[in-house]
Amino acid sequence: MTTHAEALRKLADFIDANPHLNIGTGYDKTSVHADGDSLNIFIRSMDKSADEIRAEVNEVSQSLGGIWREGGNESTRYLSQTNVLDFFETTIFSDREVVNS
């Protein structure tokens, strides 16, 4: 079973191995937040077209692999999956208005 520390190392390795995903800090970048066994990835819409957001959501989810479930509400679209990197319950969030425009 993967420990929390091992999962964080795998996450760091994933980020290092995928610089094209533009994961970083700031509102204009994709951001990753790990808290316990929850991993939240926010695909930001500032200065990006709907096509760019769709492509980025697809690229991140495909890079992590597995089967993603779609959900959302009036303002947010998300994809979710458990056991990402053998540990995390992961959700990828994006702005529904941008994705559905």
Image (tube, grey):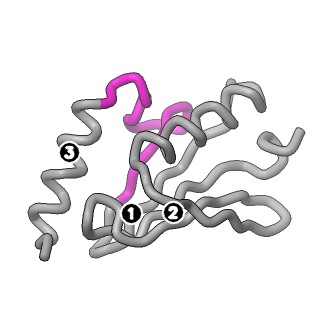
- At label 1, counting other C-alpha atoms closer than 10 Å, the crowd grade (few under 14, some 14-19, many 20 or more) is many
Between marks 1 and 3, how big is the CA–CA gap? 12 Å
Amino acid at dot 1: Leu
Q: Quadrant of residue 37?
A: bottom left
The C terminus: image quadrant = top right
Q: Label 3: state its secondary structure.
A: helix
Callout 1 touching callout 2 (CB < 8 Å): yes
Q: Label 1: state its secondary structure.
A: strand
Say which mark, if any, is on residue 91: 2
Residue at image position (62%, 66%) is 69
Q: In this image, 46 relative to 67: left or right? A: right
User: Residue 92 at what x, y percent from top left?
Assistant: 54, 55
Instruction: Choose between 96 and 62: the one closer to the eye.
Output: 62
Main SS, magenta region, reads: loop
Q: Reading the chain from its start, which is encountered first: label 1 or label 3?
A: 3
User: Residue 17 at what x, y percent from top left?
Assistant: 24, 31
Reading the image, the residue beneath label 1 is 39
Amino acid at dot 2: Thr
Between marks 1 and 2, how big is the CA–CA gap? 6 Å
Q: Is residue 28 above or below residue 70?
A: above
- At label 3, counting other C-alpha atoms closer than 10 Å, the crowd grade (few under 14, some 14-19, many 20 or more) is few
Q: Label 2: state its secondary structure.
A: strand
Q: Reading the chain from its start, which is encountered first: label 1 or label 2?
A: 1
Q: In this image, 62 relative to 2: left or right? A: right
Residue at image position (72%, 49%) is 95
Residue at image position (33%, 25%) is 19
Say which mark, if any, is on residue 12: 3
Callout 3 touching callout 2 (CB < 8 Å): no
